[in-house]
Amino acid sequence: MDSKTAPVGRFAPTPSGRMHLGNVFAALIAWLSVRSRNGSLVLRMEDLDTQRTSDEFAELLRQDLRWLGLDWDEETAPQSQRSPVYDRYFEQLRQLGLLYPCYCTRSQLHNVNAPHLSDGTYVYAGTCRNLTEPPANRLPAWRVIVPEREFVVNDLCQGTFRQNLSTDCGDFVVRRADGCYVYQLAVTVDDGEAGVTEVVRGMDLLGSAPRQMYLQELFGFAHPDYGHVPMLLAPDGRRLSKRDRDLDLGQLRLRLKPEELIGKLAAAAGLLDCCEAISAKELASVFTWDKLKGEAIYLEQL
Ligand code: GLU
């Protein structure tokens, strides 16, 4: 981490529902990391999936962040409005000769390709890389060719994470057959253009970082620092999910003060020695990354 320049962090929620504890935790750490070092925070709505997202949820997200005391310096355009920008970067990949059309159907993808153990996705076998006769009447998705190279993430929470894009991931889709850009491309462009220097988000996205680092190199963006924060788990090891409605902020706000919620999260994460109510601002004065390690945090009843 470069201590000479103030960090630029970001929080990039998907407005597809009420803010959940996992989102709260990621937002809190993203905020603490920059605010404890006089940095700034960018807010961005990741609403590429227009079927599942809405302006109403985006507004509730902003209200929930304010309630938590997590402010931001700038909100950049939501992803749903940025297709023309993504077009330009897509074109760059085409110029580099790194794109090819892929006609594989969903069932082909699952049958032919090797499963990727860590996150349930698959390693694309390159089926369409040298296609000579594309099937008629079908629009293709577009994949970017990946190098036979290991990418190394020096993660602030998870330590060293390595992924060889060729053997652990394969050529990946950057634009779907319906013309929508995918998360990996959009997030790389948005973070790069916003000058983001640190990406703090849930541990479930650690496996995406190498794809984003590769695109950063191709687009000429510097790599940000990464901090993939532990997942919040129920005491029985179950992952807290959006289905646990009682743990979304709509419910939690009815029974907890923001300082109580932040205190409980901070204590569970080891940022505080004991569970006491504390504001985000107060917590910023004692926050350091070395207190936050591991893949999971077990959360007792809130
Ligand atoms: N939009 C993603 C989410 O809400 C986060 C993506 C990111 O932080 O890179 O889970």
Image (cartoon, rainbow, N blue to C red):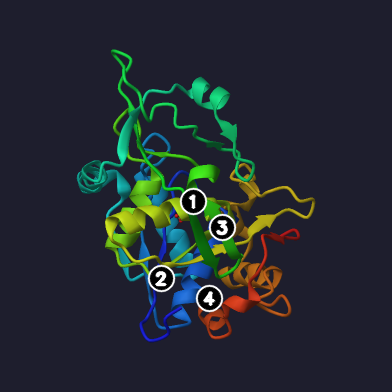
Percent position (x, y) of residue 106?
A: 48, 24
Q: Earlier in the sequence, mark 4 or mark 3?
A: 3
User: Which of the two residues, 152 or 140, is positioned nearer the viewer here?
Assistant: 152
Please say if 91 is above or below 70.
above
- Residue to which mark 4 is pinned: 280
Query: Which numbered tag is attached to residue 162?
Result: 3
Q: Rounded to the nearest whole Å, what is the CA distance between mark 2 and mark 1?
A: 27 Å
Q: Are marks 3 and 2 in contact (CB under 8 Å)?
A: no
Based on the displayed image, in which of its 4 quarters is residue 286 positioned? bottom right
Of tags 3 and 2, the one toward the viewer is: 3
Q: Residues within 10 Å of mark 1 (few under 14, many from 20)?
A: some
Percent position (x, y) of residue 130?
A: 36, 27
- Residue to which mark 1 is pinned: 208
Q: Earlier in the sequence, mark 4 or mark 1?
A: 1
Q: Earlier in the sequence, mark 3 or mark 2?
A: 2
Question: Amino acid type of disc 2?
Answer: Asp
Please say if 64 is above or below 92.
below
Q: Is mark 2 within 8 Å of ligand 1?
A: no
